Image (spheres, coloured by chain):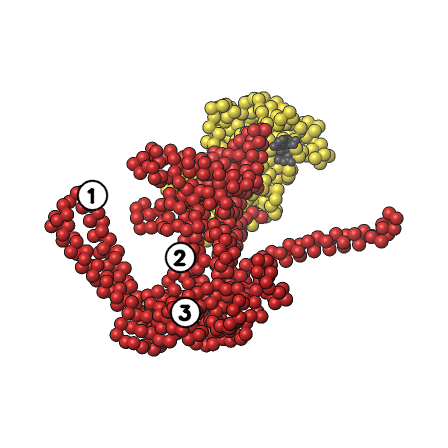
Chain colours: A red, B yellow
């Protein structure tokens, strides 16, 4: 038997089989990689692509009445089991629709799940518009005209002019609120604290001013409310939408391919620069992107010197004994510690331990409300620095080891001490390796979620950690992070299909960031290699 | 005093201190348990070229490296005995090793330009000495490159990376790097073994011209080279100094049998 097999599978054939197996494994790997990227790419970019708006007529499940609405299909999927009981599987995938209706003069958006069999008819009409509102919602309507303060009907053609006026009014309102009313508020509060009499002339004067501005605001608001967009739903019911609430009106059904591309480019820009809206299911991700980048920057500033110095000590100075070997093993084991453990350590040691001590020593006047004794950007950066320290140490040590002895000897022979040799010769030659380690650490920190949620990353932060108030960088503040943002998004995805597309878009951004970082690492490394190459 | 132009023969045994560049007395050296140098005593005359010859692995590099204490960098290296430069025992624990190495230059078999520009390579030692004035640096760099016969070839690309130079140019750059420090003693460990004959000739001329300024000690496997350029030659065999004499007599009338066997190519 054995010899028979030996005859069938000659050495050549065995080799071919092995090569074939290895190659197919590589192919599977490649395929799964590509499918991840393509999946994220498609789902993520659908957040930017202006899908067309349908006018559909569908029959209600319970009453059997048909109704016509404007809507957009968000996704289709296999029916969830809870609905399956009164539906027949053969009816096909359930479709998630975002629909707009007017009820009692109010424009209402709803997420609805219908089956293909319920749809009586569906068509694309050119004049249906997508309305984007300031709170992040989208509505599909047929615009019928504009109402201004003095005119009952203005044609839609003048929309942008009217909208400009509205924006001017809004800006004026904001100026009055921020630059006049708030200082007066603060001054009055100061008077209250100082116990200035209620009828003191200064206070009376202030109150008069206050009333003056209040009246101005009243007038402006009234003027603003005079501007309204008249819209109709698919059944012809009419509603009024205040122009002040409208961000944009566009007609995706009229756009050609390039028009859609331009629109998508605009949306991408908005995605990168705007704040999230509707509990992280609409709008942009700017604060999360900003927080991620800032956290990584701070982390790099902390981890690079520590990691490089530790690696220099380990590979250049530490005696070659069992203690050093033990430290080395400990360092590489640190890389395998689950990241949540770092999070818990950061919370317990940095936040409560060190942060609490700082508070009791330097910010005791603000206690019991903590300043540093609460999760924040700095503690998050420190925790991530600790988490990525092994990556940097191992990469640097690797690089130091590869610096040729001849180069070191040449430096010594010219009268350099050990530290001079390391600083002027060894480190520059090892710099590509160090760079690689640091960038790998950055990519790791960009994708980490669990420890960050413990030490300072939140799903919504009211302020950025950088602003115009001294000292400009507020490392004690909580911040938003792309990974945490995506994690938060997955919860919304279960109830709101719009949120899930935002989540995929954020995922795509994270992927682009990490790929970008790696690309930069490779470029930098090859440039440094070229510079420090030896033949 | 010394006459530079005539091969006046000095008595190596009773060399006066003022004529002695390096005085080695009873030098023993171990790498771990292995003894590499065995009781070596020799006086190396100033402003002469002394060649060290011997079989591969006999300890030439180790001996030459003990003149600027490069062996200190080897783990498990121990030594016994005296190496005196200017009447000072360099193996003394209070010796400033960095300063010693700055005054005893060394060129290795393989050129090792630093990953910097040509200019910075030549400056390396000077900057370590605390020289920072741009003008003086410029002058020193030019002088060192001229001394190493490299100036004409690189004067237009001083600020380009040194590793774009050819092997021979790199070796001359390494010479310039060492010469920039104006060393009293120059140690050359097989400096031409990786070079073509023409560049070798360059370097040999360079060595001869350097005699005026410093003492040169060269390790070489090339008998003709040793005979051509060196004034004195030491033959080392298995860590022992077998014969040490002026090159003319050593190559023409070796006293020891082992020396004769080696230079006639019977082994090695
Ligand atoms: N770093 C080291 N550690 C241990 N042993 C060494 C070390 N360097 C040299 N040796 C040993 O010391 C002996 C002398 O070596 P050395 O390099 O001085 O020889 P060499 O005469 O220069 O030979 P070559 O002509 O091949 O360069 C050899 O036996 C070598 O194995
Ligand atoms: Mg050697």
At 52% from the left and 69% from the top, the residue drawn is A63
Residue at 19% x, 56% y is A210
Q: Is residue A90 above or below residue B237?
A: below
How many numbered marks have been drawn onto this rendered protein structure? 3
- Residue A61: x and y in percent read 54, 67
Q: Quadrant of residue A328?
A: top right
Q: SS class of the residue under badge 3?
A: strand
Q: Quadrant of residue B224?
A: top right
Q: Are marks 3 and 2 in contact (CB under 8 Å)?
A: no
Alpha-carbon neighbours of circle 1 within 10 Å: few (<14), some, or many (≥20)?
few
Q: Is residue A131 visible?
A: no
In the rendered image of this protein, does residue A209 appear above or below residue A359? below
Question: Depth check: A41 or A196 in front?
Answer: A196
Alpha-carbon span between mark 3 and mark 1: 50 Å
Left or right of B250: which side holds A132? left
Q: Is residue A419 left or right of residue A106?
A: right
Chain letter, disc 1 residue? A
Q: Which mark is residue A102?
A: 3
Tag 2 and tag 1, C-beta contact below 8 Å: no
Asked if residue A1 is positioned above or below residue B233 in the image, the reply reads below
Say which residue label 2 marks.
A275
A11 or B189: nearer the viewer: A11
Element carrying mark 1:
helix
Single out the mark in the foreground, 3 or 2: 3
Is mark 3 in CB contact (under 8 Å) with mark 1?
no
Assess disc 3: are there few (<14), some (14-19) or many (≥20) residues with their C-alpha within 10 Å of its C-alpha. Answer: many
């Amino acid at each position: 038997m054995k010899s028979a097999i030996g005859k069938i599978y000659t050495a050549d054939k065995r080799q071919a089989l092995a090569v074939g197996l290895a190659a197919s494994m590589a192919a599977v790997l490649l395929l799964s990689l590509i499918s991840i990227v393509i999946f994220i790419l498609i789902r993520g970019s659908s957040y930017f692509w202006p899908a067309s708006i349908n006018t559909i007529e569908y029959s209600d499940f319970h009453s059997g009445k048909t109704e016509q609405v404007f809507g957009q299909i968000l996704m289709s999927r296999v029916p969830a089991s809870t609905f399956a009981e009164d539906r027949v599987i053969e009816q096909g995938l359930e479709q998630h629709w975002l629909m707009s209706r007017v009820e009692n003069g109010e424009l209402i958006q709803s997420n609805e799940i219908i089956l293909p069999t319920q749809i009586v008819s569906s068509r694309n009409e050119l004049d249906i518009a997508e309305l984007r509102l300031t709170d992040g919602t989208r509505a599909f309507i047929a615009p019928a005209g504009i109402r201004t303060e003095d005119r009952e009907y203005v044609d839609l053609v003048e929309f942008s002019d009217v909208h400009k006026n509205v924006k001017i009014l809004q800006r004026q309102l904001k100026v009055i609120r921020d630059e006049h009313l708030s200082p007066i508020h603060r001054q009055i509060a100061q008077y209250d604290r100082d116990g200035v009499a209620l009828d003191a002339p200064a206070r009376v004067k202030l109150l008069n001013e206050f009333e003056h501005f209040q009246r101005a605001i009243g007038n402006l608001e009234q003027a603003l409310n005079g501007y309204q967009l008249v819209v109709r739903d698919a059944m012809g019911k009419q509603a009024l939408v205040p122009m002040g609430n409208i961000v944009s009106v566009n007609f995706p059904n009229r756009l050609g391919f390039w028009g859609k591309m331009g629109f998508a480019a605009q949306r991408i820009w908005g995605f990168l620069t705007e704040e999230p809206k509707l509990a992280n299911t609409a709008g942009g991700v700017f604060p999360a992107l900003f927080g991620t980048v800032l956290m990584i920057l701070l982390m790099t500033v902390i981890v690079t010197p520590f990691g490089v110095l530790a690696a220099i000590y380990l590979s250049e100075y530490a005696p070659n004994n069992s203690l050093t070997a033990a430290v080395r093993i400990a360092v590489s084991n640190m890389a395998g510690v689950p990241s949540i453990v770092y999070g818990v350590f950061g919370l317990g040691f940095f936040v409560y331990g060190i942060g609490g001590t700082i508070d009791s020593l330097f910010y005791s006047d603000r206690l019991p409300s903590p300043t540093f004794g609460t999760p924040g950007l700095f503690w998050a950066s420190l925790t991530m620095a600790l988490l990525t320290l092994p990556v940097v140490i191992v990469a640097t040590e690797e690089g130091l080891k590869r610096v040729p002895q001849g180069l070191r000897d040449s430096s010594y022979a010219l009268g350099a001490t050990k530290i001079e040799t390391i600083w002027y010769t060894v480190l520059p030659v090892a710099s590509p390796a160090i760079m690689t380690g640091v960038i790998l650490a950055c990519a790791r920190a960009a994708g980490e979620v669990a420890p960050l949620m413990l030490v300072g990353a939140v799903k919504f932060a009211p302020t950025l950690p950088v602003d115009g108030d001294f000292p400009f960088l507020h490392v004690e503040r909580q911040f938003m992070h792309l990974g945490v943002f995506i994690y938060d998004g997955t919860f919304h995805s279960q109830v709101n299909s719009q949120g899930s597309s935002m989540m995929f878009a954020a995922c795509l951004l994270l992927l682009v960031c990490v790929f970008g970082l790696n690309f930069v690492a490779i470029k930098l490394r090859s440039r440094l290699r070229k510079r420090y190459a030896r033949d | 005093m010394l006459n530079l132009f005539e091969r006046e023969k000095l008595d190596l045994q009773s060399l006066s201190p003022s004529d002695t560049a390096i005085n080695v007395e009873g030098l023993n050296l171990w790498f771990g348990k292995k003894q590499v140098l065995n009781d070596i005593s020799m006086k190396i005359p100033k402003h002469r070229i002394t060649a060290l010859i011997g079989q591969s692995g006999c300890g030439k590099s180790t001996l030459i490296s003990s003149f600027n204490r490069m062996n200190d960098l080897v783990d498990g290296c121990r030594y016994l005995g005296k190496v005196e430069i200017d009447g000072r025992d360099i193996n003394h624990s209070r010796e400033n090793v960095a300063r010693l190495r700055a005054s005893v230059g060394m060129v290795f078999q393989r050129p090792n330009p630093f990953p910097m520009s040509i200019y910075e390579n030549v400056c390396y030692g000077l900057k370590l000495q605390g020289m920072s004035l741009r003008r003086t640096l410029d002058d020193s760099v030019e002088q060192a490159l001229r001394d190493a016969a490299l100036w004409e070839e690189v004067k237009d690309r001083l600020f380009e990376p040194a590793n774009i130079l050819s092997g021979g140019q790199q070796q001359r750059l390494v010479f310039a790097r060492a010469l920039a420090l104006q060393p009293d003693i120059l140690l050359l460990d097989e400096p031409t073994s990786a070079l073509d004959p023409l560049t070798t000739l360059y370097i040999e001329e360079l060595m001869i011209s350097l005699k005026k300024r410093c003492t040169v000690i060269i390790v070489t496997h090339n008998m003709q080279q040793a005979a051509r350029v060196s004034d004195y030659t030491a033959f080392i065999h298995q860590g022992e100094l077998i014969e040490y004499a002026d090159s003319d007599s050593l190559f023409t009338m070796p006293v020891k049998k082992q020396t004769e066997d080696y230079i006639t190519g019977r082994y090695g």
